[in-house]
Every structure is written in structure tokens, then in C-alpha cells.
Image (cartoon, grey):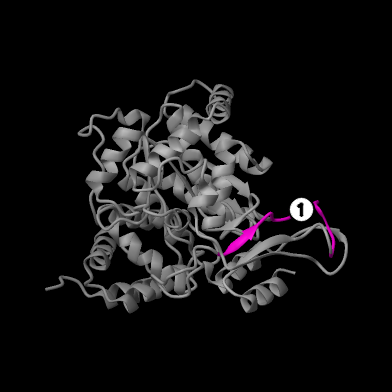
Amino acid sequence: MMRFRPQEILRKKRDGQELDDEELRDFVQGIADGDVDPAQTGAFTMATYLQGMTTTEIVSLVLAMRDSGVVADWEAAGIDRSKVIEKHSSGGVGDEKITLLVVPVAVACGLYVPNMSAWGLDYCPGEVDMLDSVPGYDGVPGVDTFVKNVVETGGSIIGPNPDLAPADSVIFQVRDVTATVESVPLITGSIMSKKLAANPSGVVISVGCGSGAFMHTIERARELATSMHRVATGAGIPSVMLITDLNSVLGSSVGSAVEMIEVADFLTGAYRDRRVTELVLTISAHMLVLGGIVADMAAGLRMAREHLESGAAAAKFDEILHAQGGPEGFTAHAREILPEAAVVRPVHCTSSGWISSMDTTEIGKTLVDIGGGRVVPGGEIDLTVGFTEFAQIGDAVDPHSAALCVLHCHSEESWQAAARRLR
């Protein structure tokens, strides 16, 4: 028999009262166990979105979400935990590829990175959706397999796991369809519960800011960064929070399979976007400093670039992907391996000019419209659709040669509707 009444906790939060540690632990564990109804979970996310949470409540929420499952034990696995460093992003259009690039660079440099990532959320795609486009990839291995892969390859990138912070999986999906994605306490809870369940000795998080991020203003981005930093400090680990510009599409592609091709091209050196390169090297360097591999950022940047340029990071990505069921030699054969959309064609503007700005949220919503994002929890998405060769701010475009992007869709009708919205 349930020893608490969920509706009483909901009533308190609805009315703006502070929930204590026991109440939050009871409610979160009830979500994980299935004792709290999905409608009550939705009510909780909305009440939290509207009323907010104190720092004490947020810390209690994160620790309750972490403790709803098991916590990785690296000492038992024979790993020096001081070299276990996590990376995460608060989300943004085009930003999802960064984790998939940072992990192999950091691991090639000597760190262990047990990365817990996520599906797409609202108008922002997700790392796990990208990896799901790779035939054979297993994004939800058991905890023992997850730990084994980190021990043997140095890193692993997985999705929400039923054993690691399982309450987050439920809350995450509810947030996606209840217009509560942007809540700072809930974003903090989702990110930090997964990070702490992976049990790192430090964490680097990029907080996207701008029209393509959940935090549209610098003030909101700082609020989220501060919230996550306080939780990390409360959990006893150092953290680095980087606020990044997402007022335009990051990189040249958005989608699942199409972004995996950009990942392969980046790692092999076939194509590297300037902004993506700067962010990947900066995050990797901060991780190397936290893990004690280097003494300062300058040394970290040099080491990260060396391991990227040498091909060591590409080889490590192939190793990590193969350990999770993916094909061998992925980065060299990505185009042959990945599925393709039925209709692939450039989108041109109606007059010549230069890109001065873009509504990146609308670009993300266009991806959802063509099937590349979810509209119901756990819904299937089309892993082949998306955008490539995206024009950037300052680029010249015209009706004939220089396109806004190349649009990948499942049908001609879908292509036409998406092209209109993109223009």
C-alpha cells in the first residue's frame, strides 16, 4: 500500500509551497515504481513549471531521481574514478552531435566517459535518436554491459536506462508532450540525475542559449547553469558550465541519420564546421583538466586537437560504436551503412541575399513536422529525415545555386510543406 497521497504533494506544489526531501523522494520513487499515475506526473511537471523550486527542492529532486535506480560503481570495476568525467548538453538544434564528437576525443586522450544521453525533446533532436539510425546499435544495454563497455573501450553512449535514474525516463517523456520542457528545475533534474547515476568525478555541461535552445535568453541560460552547478557542488563533484550560442543551427545538419554522417565526416576530417570544432575542443579540454590528464586549458586544447587530427578519435568512436552492436569501421563507411530518405533536394529562397538571422526553434519544429521528432511519449520517428548543408548566418543564398539547405523527406508532399516553412 502506498504510504503517501500523490494528490497532497501536487496540491502543495500547485499552491507554491516548498516540498521537503521526504515528499520529493516518495513522489519520485512512486513515478519510478509506477505507483504515481501518468496524469499525476504531468500535473507535477506543470505545477513545477509554473511555481518553480527552491535550490533545496532541486537538490532533493535530483538526488531522489538518481536514487530511483542504481549508481555505477567504478572502483569495483577497477577504474580510477578520478579519470571518469561526464559531458552533457542542455539541448539545442544541431547541438546533439557534440556529445558524440566529444566522447571519442576525450577517451582517446585517456579519460573514461560513461555518457548517459537522451532522445530528442520537443523541437531539439537527441543523441540516442542519432545513434538509433545505426544498424545494430544497442542504446539501452544493462548496467553491467554499460560498465563493461566503459572498462574495455573507455567510453559508452547510452539512452535512458531502466536501472539508471529510471524516474527520469518517465518524467522526460511527460515533459516532452506537456509543454514543460523549459522548466529549469526539471531540466536540472533530468540532466544531473543521469550524470550522478553515472557516478563521475567531474562534469562539463554546455548550456545552449538562443532561438535554437530551450533557454532563449542569456539570463535563463545563466539560471540553468547556476542551478546545475549548485547541484554538482551539493553532490561533491566539480563542474564546468559553458554557455553556448545557439541562435543558428549548429553545424551543417539536423536529424538522425544525416547528422551521423556529419559526425563521421568530422572525425575523419572530411568536413569540420568551425563552430562545432571550437566547441568540441573546448569541452574536451575542460574534461581533460578536470580528470587530471593535463594541467591547464592550453595543454588540453593541444592534446584534444592532436588526437582528433591523428585519427585516434575516429578509431575510438568506431570501437565504442561496435562494442554497442554497431558495424565495424563506421566512420569510413557511414554513407553506405545509414538509411536514406526517399526525397532529397535543395531548398532555395525566392530572392538573392545573405542570411542575417534564423528562427532556429521553427527549424526544429519543421523537423518534427516531417517526422523527425515525437508528438507523443515513446512515439516512433523517421530516422532518415532532416536537413543537410544548412546555410549559416552571413552566407549568401539565391533562388538557383546557393541553397538554404538540402531537405531530406519521406514524400514529395512532406518536402513541399517543409520547404515552405523553412523559407
Of the residues shown, which amino acid type is indicated by label 1? Ile
Q: Quadrant of residue 254?
A: bottom right
Residue placed most toward the observer, 112 or 370:
370
Magenta span of residues:
385-399
- Above or below: residue 375 compared with residue 192: below
53 or 152, which lies in front? 152
Residue 145: give x, y in percent of width and height: 25, 45
Would residue 404 appear left or right of 83 to someone viewing this image?
A: right
Q: Is residue 390 magenta?
A: yes
Query: What percent of the width, then of the height, locates residue 283?
Result: 53, 37
Considering depth in this image, is 82 or 352 the residue closer to the camera? 352
Q: Is residue 281 toward the left or the right of residue 100 in the image?
A: right
The answer, for residue 239, to whether it is visible in the render is no
Query: Which secondary structure dominates the residues rendered in magenta?
Result: loop
Q: Determine crowd level at label 1: few under 14, some 14-19, many 20+ residues with C-alpha closer than 10 A.
A: some
Q: Is residue 195 above or below residue 314?
A: below
Q: Disc 1 designates what residue?
A: 393
> Looking at the image, which residue is at 23% across and 67% down?
30
Q: Is residue 284 visible?
A: yes
Residue at 43 percent of width and 68 percent of height = 175
Q: Position of residue 263 (x, y in %)?
A: 55, 45
The N terminus: image quadrant: bottom left
> Residue 81, percent across and down?
31, 31
Residue at x 58% of width, y 28% of height: 309
Residue sticking out furthest to the right: 352
In the foreground, 262 or 219: 262
Question: Which structural element holds mark 1?
Answer: loop
Q: Is residue 323 rendered magenta in the image?
A: no
Q: Residue furthest left?
A: 1
109 with respect to 411 (left or right): left
| Residue most extreme to the front | 336
How many numbered marks are there?
A: 1
